[in-house]
Amino acid sequence: MHKRYLTAEQIGQELHKRILGDESAFPCPKEDCYVPVPKSHPTDSHGRNWDVTPSGHDASYAASLRSIVEEARREYFLSDLADHDELVGAAFTHA
């Protein structure tokens, strides 16, 4: 599966957007739905190189957040170069 390269800030924004879109799992007010900053780690056997550790939330919130994080970890690769895919794709297109 092809992953999109995003910065930690972009991944955090995507997670927050998903939380706000799932009112059944996250019935909290928008200002109370906090997502910790994704932290990088060496790429694991599943091709994931980042994770989020929820803290300060009840078990239900943490479990729902974990579900969303795991889904996003399959889709996004943490990078300092958010435009990496687009730049590489453009290089091949114009070569």
Image: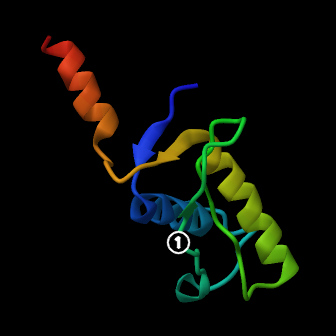
Q: Residue at point 31% right, 38% down?
A: 84
Q: Position of residue 58 (x, y in %)?
A: 82, 84
Say which residue label 1 marks.
37
Residue 9, above or below 81: below
Q: Residue at point 31% right, 48% down?
A: 81
Q: Position of residue 21 (x, y in %)?
A: 58, 62
The quarter of the image holding the N terminus is top right
Q: Position of residue 79 (x, y in %)?
A: 41, 49
Residue 85, above or below 62: above
Label 1: element kind = loop
Q: Residue at point 28% right, 43% down?
A: 83
Q: Position of residue 29 (x, y in %)?
A: 60, 86
Residue toward you, 43 or 14: 43
Q: Residues within 10 Å of mark 1 (few under 14, many from 20)?
A: some
Residue 83, above or below 69: above
The quarter of the image holding the C terminus is top left
